[in-house]
Amino acid sequence: MIFRLENIRYKGILKIDDLKIPACMVTCLTGESGAGKTSLLRLLNRMDDPDSGSIYYEDQLLDKFNPIELRRKVTMLSQAPFTLPGTIEENLQIGLELTEREKKDKAELVKALETVQLQKSLDEGAENLSGGEKQRLALARLLLLKPEVYLLDEPTSALDEEAELTVMSRFLEEVKREKGTVIMITHSKQLADICAEKRIVLKKAKEGDY
């Protein structure tokens, strides 16, 4: 198990007595609005810390990790991913720069775009992309980082059903090739049915644990 959570309490939102998340698999988080799905993702890379309880990453207490170093291994893609003024190439390279990784050559950047089916040239302006195209760009940027764990918060919310399945199938295939772990929030039944190897259904804390 890559993550283990014990007796977690967080702001009256999360109440998780015992939860294990497997490595090198796709785990889908589902549940009604307000059940704490995004909060759980944020706990897993120390964007937030629980009020009480313990989280273990690879059998080590999460709070022993330097948050910056942890986020290089456990990287989160928010529901509204950022784009910067400038070209698609600059937006792909910025993630590498911010995490002090070496820049990729153009061939690797193009391959990442092809994986998520973003048919744009590297010198096009990122600000002109649609919402769905920006999500694909963010997924491509994440692929280039090659973290150990991908935390995805509604990564296909701006894509139609056909596109979300095609894009995520290819994205996940590439992640598995690198032996990565995916923990993904989705409201798409289609995506969860086809891609999930494990499902976790969260309920609101007042109703009990997950």
Image (cartoon, helix red, strand yellow):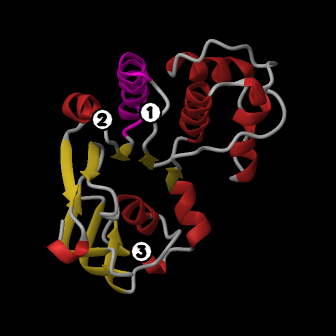
Asked if residue 173 lies in the magenta stretch, the reply is yes
Q: Which residue is mark 3?
A: 62
Of residues 177 and 74, the one drawn nearer to the viewer in this rendering: 74
Residue in the picture at 76% in, 46% down:
97
Q: Name the secondary structure under disc 1.
A: loop
Q: Residues within 10 Å of mark 3 (few under 14, many from 20)?
A: many
The reply to whether callout 2 and callout 1 are in contact (CB within 8 Å) is yes
Residue in the picture at 24% in, 74% down:
205
Mark found first going from the N terminus, 2 or 1: 1
Q: Amino acid at mark 3?
A: Leu
158 left or right of 27 in image: right
Q: Is residue 84 above or below residue 34?
A: above
134 left or right of 1 in image: right
Q: Name the secondary structure under disc 2.
A: loop
Q: Nearer the viewer, mark 3 or mark 2?
A: 2
Q: Which mark is residue 156?
A: 1
Of residues 66 and 35, the one drawn nearer to the viewer in this rendering: 35
Q: Residues within 10 Å of mark 1 (few under 14, many from 20)?
A: many
Q: Which mark is residue 188?
A: 2
Residue 158's spot in the image, x, y percent? 50, 31
Q: Amino acid at mark 1?
A: Thr
* Magenta stretch, overall SS: helix
State the quadrant of the C terminus: bottom left
Whole-number angstrom distance, CA of label 3 to CA of label 2: 30 Å
Q: Name the secondary structure under disc 3.
A: helix
Q: Amino acid at mark 2?
A: Ser
